[in-house]
Image (cartoon, grey):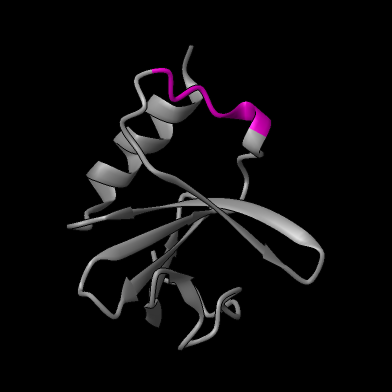
């Protein structure tokens, strides 16, 4: 389910502590998935507002991204799969 919509984050964009975006690999479930310089992946959640997240267990390290006066939430994961992404979105938005 890859789309050709322009990525929000450009190649080389620093996520944190010198970890940068290599490239966007897909957009799925209203999420941009990026490959990072340390070979992990970054999920940029495009349709979930920071106040909608219910990560009560503190499972995920939420990273706020601000660009062009907009703010998104993202998280770094070691491996990427559509199933994992679906589970993460469900975990973050279900009370």
Pick the front one: 18 or 54? 18
Residue 10 is situated, as x and y percent measured from the top left of the image, at 54, 84
Pick the front one: 26 or 15? 15
Q: Residue at x 82, y 64 (%)?
A: 69
Range shown magenta: 51-56
Residue 48, compared with residue 94, is above or below; it is below
Q: Residue furthest front?
A: 17
Residue 15 is situated, as x and y percent measured from the top left of the image, at 46, 69
Q: Would you say the magenta stretch is mainly helix, strand or loop?
A: loop
Q: Residue at x 38, y 43 (%)?
A: 61
Residue 54 lies within the magenta run: yes
Q: Residue at x 44, y 25 (%)?
A: 55
Q: In the picture provided, is 10 more to the left or to the right than 86?
A: right
Residue 93, compared with residue 38, is above or below; it is above
Q: How many marks?
A: 0
Residue 60 is situated, as x and y percent measured from the top left of the image, at 35, 38
Q: In the picture provided, is 74 more to the left or to the right than 90?
A: right
> In which quarter of the view is residue 83 placed?
top left
Q: Residue furthest top?
A: 95
Residue 35, compared with residue 59, is above or below; it is below
Pick the front one: 62 or 26? 62
> In which quarter of the view is residue 26 placed?
bottom left
Q: Residue at x 62, y 46 (%)?
A: 47
Residue 21, compared with residue 41, is above or below; it is below
> In which quarter of the view is residue 39 placed?
bottom left
Q: Quadrant of the N terminus?
A: bottom left
Q: In the picture provided, is 67 more to the left or to the right than 93?
A: right
Residue 51 is situated, as x and y percent measured from the top left of the image, at 67, 29
């Amino acid at each position: 389910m890859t789309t050709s919509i322009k990525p929000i984050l450009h190649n080389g964009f620093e996520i944190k502590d010198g970890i940068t975006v290599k490239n966007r690999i897909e957009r799925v479930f209203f999420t941009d998935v990026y490959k990072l310089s340390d070979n992990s992946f970054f999920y940029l959640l495009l349709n979930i507002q920071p106040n909608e997240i219910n990560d009560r267990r503190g499972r995920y390290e939420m990273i706020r991204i601000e660009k062009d006066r907009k703010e998104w939430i993202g998280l770094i994961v070691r491996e990427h799969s559509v199933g994992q992404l679906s589970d993460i979105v469900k975990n973050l938005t279900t009370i």
